Image (cartoon, rainbow, N blue to C red):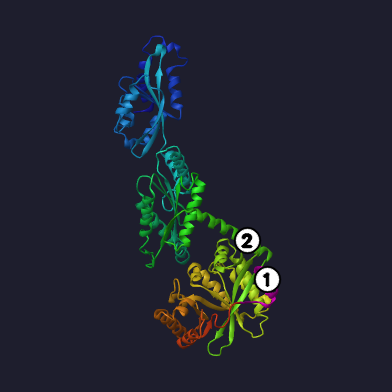
Amino acid sequence: MKTESLASQQQGCAFSALSGQEGYVQTVAMSHSQLMRMLDQIPVGVMLLDPKTLCISYYNEASRKILEQISDLLPVAVDSLLGVNVDVFHKAPAEQRTLLMDAAMPPHRARIHLGPEILDLSVSRVFGPNGVDYGPMLTWSLVTAQVRAEEHVFRLANYDILTGLHNRAAFMEKLESVLESAGSDEKSLETAMMFIDLDGFKIVNDTYGHATGDLMLTHVAEVLGALCRKAGVFLARLGGDEFAVIVQNASIEQVGLLAGRIIDAFEYPFVLPTGHQHQMGASIGIAFSPEHGTQSSLLLSRADMALYAAKAGGKNMARIFLPQMEESVLMRSRLERMLRDAFVHSRDMFVFYQPIVDLTSGQVVSREALMRWYDASRGWIPPKDFIPVAEEAGLVYDLDSFVLHAACRDAAAWSDGASVAVNVSASSVGQGRLPGVVAMALAASGLPAERLSVEVTETALMSGGNEALRDLQALRDMGVGISLDDFGTGFSSLAHLRAFPFDRIKIDGSFVQDGDRRSDCAAIVRALAQLGVTLRVATVAEGVETVQQRQRVQEDGCTYAQGYLFGRPEPALRDLSRLNEINGQSLH
């Protein structure tokens, strides 16, 4: 059917009702043809319905073009729609028909799904003189692309792209809403906020790459999603390997059971695309509202404190917030400020030295540099307290630089020509800065590179990956010795001995000391010493305190030994005056 004849036919249908009263046409300021041209030029679809039958009596040119785009979804041809009931646009038209038949119906809008397409519809009533009802008028447009774009924007704003879980923004909005509604409902139970952090994820990223890490995160999201797919549980990925859960109207026992199921879910190793298996864990911090706070920021902070306590307690566990955790965080914050101040002013930070002897000759061949810090308000602060703070606060570079410069300067003045060993933080290895720091310390002191040994732990190799090996090779190229510290503990693996040609292996002192009463520890020392002989790598037995222990490690084949039997850590001569002052003050 041609457009012109269709328009003429529609004019007759549309205005047969409108000319029902004589004289109506004279009240219209334009002719039918002028009105039709105007309607056809409107870029929005317009459609008129018969008030009694709801059959289509008119549709404009814009409607025809839109309908042709979705003609495969219509039960009749586009050019045959005149006189067809509007029900063709509805799968279940009963409710819509009731609305359209009601002459008192107020104007309204709706969105209709027609297969994969979406129509945006505005419905109003047309009345003539004396209130004559001419039926419903529909104005509409095809908004599928717009809606899909809106949905895409919404997903970007509210969902994590990698895992498909809710993101941080959606989580915060949900938490605010839940806390607000809980505060207005006296009968509601507590709301639990759970922070979940993966244990051992960074190693996967650093060792196997971010693509493998992303696969693991997707797997974790699936596992957590299956556990949390229940009413009242809201799961989100906050970023990195951090996830969070909101549990509404739950008891402590119910939240504890969920936390336990999450931890148990990571009991089995994750199989990487390379075929390797990696054991992960999950640490969880939990805070309850209103008990631990009714503001989202406070609840988040306290759940985070509980998470930190779970990490510090050995990982792969859940902890509920306790008031003393907050005090611990405040103390840690104060310690960080004190440490920063000490670095800025070089205030009462010292390096002590403990001898390492040759078991055959009994001569001191090296000394290990050990960091010590004194604060006037707190006294001597143990390294186990301030070194983790330095690592978390980003002060490791300053700490390593301080010890390296002091150790090289002091060793250059030793008359016996002993070397000096400096244990660097695991987080320093693999960042590309360590070789430069060592080079500057050697240059500033004039100490030959072969008289410096850098000690690293296996943790540094695992977390630093190939970058760590590049740093160590750069030090080796300078002539600096490389020792593997605390071998036999943690993630000990012969693969680490194959990854790099170490000069020394240091056997952890716990095995040496427990060897007096435990045959398994004695066997470990013996095996490691023989391993050193086989690999032609010197072995250092740490923690030797008795003559019997010295004799045993020497018989086992160890090359060197270190411990209180040979000497306690002692300060450099240049620090004796200040240390005497400190000791004098501490006695009063």
Residue 285, by quadrant, is bottom left
Which residues fall within the magenta stretch? Answer: 570-588
> Which of pointers 1 and 2 lies earlier in the amino acid sequence?
2
Mark 1 surroundings within 10 Å by alpha-carbon count, few (fewer than 14), some (14 through 19), many (20 or more): few
Residue at 44% from the left image edge and 11% from the top image edge: 26
Give the dominant element type of the magenta stretch: helix, strand or loop: helix
The one nearer the camera, 507 or 203, is: 507
Q: Secondary structure at mark 1?
A: helix
Q: According to the image, label 2 marks what residue?
A: 338
Position of the C terminus by quadrant: bottom right
Callout 1 amino acid: Gly
The one nearer the camera, 428 or 51, is: 428
Residue 127, position in %: x, y?
40, 17
Q: Secondary structure at mark 2?
A: helix
In this view of the protein, can residue 156 be seen by the observer?
no
Q: In the displayed structure, would residue 26 be above or below residue 331? A: above
Membership of 172 in magenta stretch: no
- Residue located farthest toward the front when viewing the structure as drawn: 588
Side of 86 where 300 appears, left or right: right
Q: According to the image, label 1 marks what residue?
A: 584
In this view of the protein, can residue 27 be seen by the observer?
yes
Residue 261, position in %: x, y?
35, 56
Residue 334, position in %: x, y?
60, 58
Residue 587, by quadrant, is bottom right
